Image: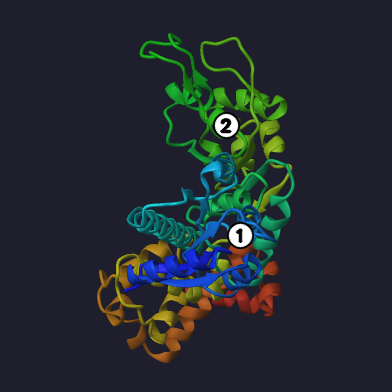
């Protein structure tokens, strides 16, 4: 097996021939050139592991060749052969990106050792880069916003438009619809993508430590504060702070958050110093907060400050056409993650999936898909709980009832509007509602 493919450049023919023979004997594939111009063409045309070049040559010298390689083939190791008096120049070459330099006359065994180590280092760096890229691609795939329905296409367009605007955003969607996924997409597509994305679940932090968690504290601010501590706002500097379940934020904290949104400064607990913060706020709520505002549990001024731009995520029941794609996507990801074969999703199972209510939305569907991929659920026929064994009229009735229920929910129970969406008379809709027990007939 070859130790590596080397480009050797030297205008000294005797040295070029001797070095080529020696390196070939030691397991290297060597392409030898007397002129840097010819060597550079070979570098551009094919795979190369390392370039070993003399520093001083007529025409294009080793330093110029190094600069050209650094521009066109970054990461390709270059080792310079120098005369004793060129050491200072070789040191300058190291600053410009050379891997190493060797003084002539050199020890032939040492030359081989240096080349082997340089190529191993380069290959390891390339492999790390490949794995990192693979991880990023998998992360991107896992965090993709999946769905080809009109609602999801509109959602992606909305995200793309708002990502480029420096404005705080409120995301509204039922539990399990993917609010954090949307927040992450806003972050990734913004100019803040290289800075932190910090997520806080406002419903999971006890009120007694909420201020310390968000704003940080100084030593001695309270019993147990043994040192200064940076809060989430400071930690997210330059990036995005995601406030999930904003409706659960303690009322006492809402005025302080409002001030931060308006002035972009924070005070650590126990400190009088104002600290500027550069963050974008993305908040999320399960509803439009109108009920919370009416009951006095949520500040109206904070709502309007957060909702200067909003993104509404449709529930899964309103985009049944995406269910099959989502199920296959999550099942495939789970299979690959745990080394399982690509799952086969039979048409009857797809039919059954589309008919389900999915009250837990995409989160519930994802959990079902992962269990299916890992064969943790029963046989698909058992999963469907006898749906396929039902007579055709019963299947049609089940399907129709779900369509009607979805139309009613879209229109807040208004049967006239729902009938318009479905393209049927109100009287017909009321009869079907009564037949399926969805709602007492005549209720609007």
Q: In the depicted view, which residue is nearer to us: 171 or 212? A: 212
Q: Could you tell me which quadrant the N terminus lies in? A: bottom left
Query: Which residue lies under the disc numbered 1?
Result: 69
Q: In the depicted view, which residue is nearer to us: 425 or 288? A: 288
In the rendered image, the vertical position of residue 335 relative to residue 205, given as above or below: below
Q: In the depicted view, which residue is nearer to us: 63 or 183? A: 63
Assign a secondary structure to mark 1.
helix
Q: Could you tell me which quadrant the C terminus lies in? A: bottom right
Q: Residues within 10 Å of mark 2 (few under 14, many from 20)?
A: some
Number of residue marks: 2
The answer to whether 1 appears left or right of 232 in the picture is: left
Q: Which residue is drawn at 64% across and 57% down?
A: 61
Q: Does the CB distance between marks 1 and 2 fall below 8 Å?
A: no
Q: In the depicted view, which residue is nearer to us: 345 or 60? A: 60
Q: Residue 79, which numbered label?
A: none
- Disc 1 vs disc 2: which is toward the camera? 1
Picture coordinates of residue 317 (x, y %)?
Answer: 53, 67
Q: Residue at x 46, y 65 (%)?
A: 49
The answer to whether 95 appears left or right of 17 in the picture is: right
**If you read the primary sequence from the N terminus, does the residue marked by circle 1 or circle 2 appear first?**
1
Picture coordinates of residue 256 (x, y %)?
Answer: 61, 23
Quarter of the image where one finds residue 223? top left
Query: Which residue lies under the disc numbered 2?
Result: 297
Residue at the far front: name it: 14
Q: How far apart are marks 1 and 2 (CA)?
A: 63 Å
Q: How crowded is mark 1: few (under 14 residues within 10 Å), some or many (20 or more)?
A: many
**Residue 201 seen in the current view:** yes
Picture coordinates of residue 289 (x, y %)?
Answer: 61, 42
Assign a secondary structure to mark 2.
loop
Picture coordinates of residue 186 (x, y %)?
Answer: 63, 51
Q: Which residue is drawn at 36% across and 57% down?
A: 108
């Amino acid at each position: 097996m070859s130790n590596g493919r080397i480009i050797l450049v030297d205008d000294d023919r005797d040295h070029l021939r001797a070095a080529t023979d020696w390196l070939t004997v030691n397991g290297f594939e060597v392409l030898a050139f007397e002129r840097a111009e010819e060597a550079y063409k070979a570098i551009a045309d094919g795979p190369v592991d390392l370039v070993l070049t003399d520093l001083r040559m007529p025409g294009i010298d080793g330093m110029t060749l190094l600069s050209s390689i650094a521009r066109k083939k970054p990461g390709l190791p270059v080792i310079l052969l120098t005369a004793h008096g060129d050491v200072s120049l070789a040191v300058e070459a190291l600053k410009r990106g050379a891997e190493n330099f060797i003084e002539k006359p050199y020890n032939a065994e040492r030359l081989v050792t240096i080349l082997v180590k340089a190529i191993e280092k380069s290959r390891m760096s390339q492999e790390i880069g490949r794995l990192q890229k693979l991880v990023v691609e998998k992360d991107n795939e896992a965090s993709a916003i999946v769905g080809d329905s009109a609602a999801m296409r509109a959602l992606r367009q909305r995200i793309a438009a708002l990502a480029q605007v420096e404005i705080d955003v409120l995301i509204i969607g039922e539990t399990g619809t993917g609010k954090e996924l949307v927040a992450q997409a806003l972050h990734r597509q913004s100019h803040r993508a290289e800075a932190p994305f910090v997520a806080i679940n406002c419903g999971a932090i006890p009120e007694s430590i909420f201020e310390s968690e968000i704003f940080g504290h100084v030593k001695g601010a309270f019993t147990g504060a043994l040192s200064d501590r940076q809060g989430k706002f400071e930690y997210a500097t330059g990036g995005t702070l995601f406030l999930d379940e904003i409706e659960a934020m303690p009322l006492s904290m809402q005025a302080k958050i409002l001030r931060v949104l308006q002035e972009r400064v924070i005070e650590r607990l126990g400190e009088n110093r104002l600290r500027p913060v550069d963050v974008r706020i993305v908040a999320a709520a399960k509803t439009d907060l109108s009920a919370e505002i009416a009951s006095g549990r949520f500040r109206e001024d904070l709502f309007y400050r957060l909702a200067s731009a909003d993104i509404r995520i449709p529930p899964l029941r309103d985009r049944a056409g995406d269910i099959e794609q989502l199920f296959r996507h999550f099942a495939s990801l789970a299979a690959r993650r745990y080394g399982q074969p690509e799952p086969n999703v039979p048409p009857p199972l797809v039919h059954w999936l589309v008919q389900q209510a999915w009250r837990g939305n995409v989160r519930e569907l994802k959990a079902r898909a992962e269990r299916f991929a890992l064969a943790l659920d029963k046989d698909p026929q058992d999963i469907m709980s006898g749906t396929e064994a039902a007579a055709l009229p019963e299947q049609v009735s089940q399907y129709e009832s779900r369509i009607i229920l979805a139309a009613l929910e879209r229109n807040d129970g208004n049967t006239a509007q729902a009938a318009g969406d479905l393209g049927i008379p109100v009287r017909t809709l009321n009869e079907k509602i009564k037949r399926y027990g969805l709602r007492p007939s005549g209720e609007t």
